[in-house]
Image (cartoon, rainbow, N blue to C red):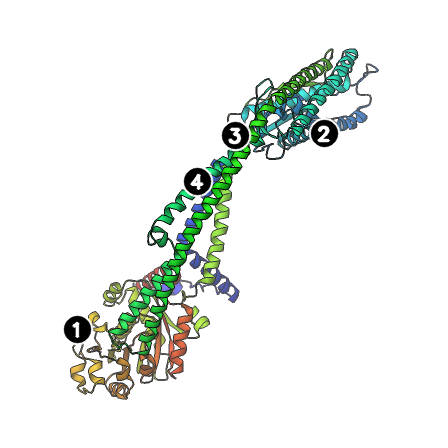
Amino acid sequence: MSSMIEKKEPPVMGYEDIEETATVMHYWQAAMRHKIPILSIVAACITLGLIITLLMTPFFTSTARIEINREQDKVTNVEAVNARENAGQNLEFYQTQYALLESRSLAERVVRAKNLTADNRFFQAFGVDPDNDGLLSAANNSQSAAQRNERMKLATEILQSNIGISPINGSSLVDISFESPNSNLSAEIANAWVNEYVASNLDRRFNSTADAKLFLEEKLAELRQRLEDSERNLSAYADNKEIITLSSDQTSEGKTVSQKTLASANLEALNNELARAMADRISAESEAKQRFGDKTALANATLNRLREERAVAQADYAQLMTQFEPGYPTAKALESKISALNGSISDEEQRSRTGTDARYREAAERENTLRKQVNLLKSEFRGERRDSIQYNIFQREVDTNRQLYDGLLQRYKEIGVAGVGTNNVSLVDRATPSERPSSPVLLLNIALAMFIGVAIAAGYVLVMEQLDQTIKDPSELKTKIGIASLGSIPDLDKEDILSSLTDKKSVAWEAYLSIRTSLTFLTEHGIPRSFLLTSTRPNEGKSTSALALATVLASSKKRILIIDGDMRNPSLHSMLGKKNNYGLSNYLSGDDNLDQLIHKGSEFEFDAMSAGPIPPNAAELLSGTRMGELIASLNDLYDTVIVDAPPVLGFADIPLLANSLEGVIYTIEAGGAKLRDIQSSIQRIRSSHAHIFGGITTKVPSQSSGYGYTYQYNYGSQASENA
């Protein structure tokens, strides 16, 4: 039956597919390495977007609907005689009406109708401060025609930028919408827009009550002239008496009740400065009376730095005195440095005392100067108060003329629409205050914030990947440091690896078994007869890897010996549960009894030689010929000799050890040592003319190595084959 089963060949991936898959996997692994910063950035952006949305001023939109009908003169009772012409004229008519609804003149009518130029709350609702824009309050009598026009222009621009005209297709209905931070204001402006559009339409069509309008126009011209004259008198008197008004308060009727002048503002500001100057003088006087060494001295950064340098120098000098005499050159140099620092500290203390006295004198002089200026401003303010009596008389005249002018102007507008007949514009729906804001839209802003967060996170990952100069993937060994990759070890705890070596189906066993396979292709005779394992720095997994390789090699009935070559920090005896009473250091010191120095057999089926007692200088022991003689004699007794060597950086042991062995296997922790340190260590090994077989990447994260999938797949395949 098995012969009848058709075997399908797996699809062959091309080079481009493999390269594309590798690129995608590279980006995925980079994202998984930085998943916490990515999630933090996205969460921060979403939170910031939420906060900004909640802090944004909500805008409410109110809509009024009108109907615009085209009136036609009916010459005969026959309708639709000129249907085609009317079709074109209708289009032109409605386009004209839409343009009129968006016109600047209509916006100005609304401004005047709602008296928005005098309503500061209207400007504040849209975040506009007319005073900061160089404009005075609308009820300020010192306001010139240019300033009034400027306020009118500003209010008109606000209305035009927030109004919306939306014709409904296939009908004569038009929606007029207004958007503002206040729902009631939006409804008022939308309704006012409709009202003023109807009024303007009627003004263009009818011209009734001409006599009354002419009378009002003459009166308005007379009142306008009186208002301008009173404003000029007020301005001339203020200029003559040098009364400069900064702000004023008005009642609901438009009367000016209080004003703030430049003299009063200057007096208030200068009096505040005098109070601060008195506080500064008192503080400086208090510091000048205190002896040096208090908090002022503690706040002196230069003095603190000099004292720290002196403390460091004294500590170095004390350390040298434990080893050398006072006449030692380095000790003399430190003693001279300490003396120089003591002098600098004394100079800095004297300079700080001098600076405190100078600050006190400056504070006292500034207080006296400000006090004189305050007295001068008091005299000026008293004179201004006497002149303000006549100024208020002129101000009341201006207020009265303006009220008369505004009332007559309003009456003139009302007379203008009197006697109006039918109108072709009718109101369908009035605008009502909206209960919910139309903007901002929370979901849209959060989606935008999420998109921005993902973009920032992607940029962060790209930058961090460029700045991260470490080996993260076994494939980078060849491209970045020029050595072959012999295999990789997943990121497991040290105890997990040691305990899992007894299980030949464990992840650690499979990883080191693949490395053993790579070792068989290193030399002509297969697995090297002798090699050492080293790393850039401690704790990169070289000792564990040496023990694991010895275990895997011994499982194939090979005679394996592992030597703890790190005599400065031995660890093999503790992993095997042995004592470190004798070992490599004894042999290098002259003890030739190998049977006593080698621990025969273990639970891992190999022999071991511990480092032995820690010598005073391991480099001197390795510099002789004893290490080479030991390896030569052991090669006659064992198939492979593995040396667990110390790290490269900071020690001179590796160049001495490497010459005695057949080659070096370099252990690199994924994401551990910097690339420049690894390259420096590799160059140091090569400078000793040692042969580097390749490298082992340890502590590879699961998302980078794919062990979770690979080994489960291998076990499943093996189980299927056994079945």
How far across and down, in percent of the image, does residue 401 sit?
68, 17
**Residue 129 vertical placement versus 478 (above, below):** above
Spatial CA span between label 1 and label 3: 77 Å
How far across and down, in percent of the image, does residue 128 sit?
58, 33
* Residue 69 visible in the snapshot: no
Asked whether the beta carbons under mark 1 and mark 2 sit within 8 Å of each other, the answer is: no
Instruction: Count the marks.
Output: 4
Residue 117, quarter of the rendered image: top right
* Element under disc 3: loop
Q: Earlier in the sequence, mark 2 or mark 4?
A: 2
Asked whether the beta carbons under mark 3 and mark 4 sit within 8 Å of each other, the answer is: no
**Disc 2: which residue:** 99
Spatial CA span between label 1 and label 2: 98 Å
Left of 238 or right of it: where is 620? left
Query: How many C-alpha atoms fall within 10 Å of the one at disc 2: few (<14), some, or many (≥20)?
Result: few
Residue type marked 2: Ala
* Residue 563 visible in the snapshot: yes
Q: Earlier in the sequence, mark 1 or mark 4?
A: 4
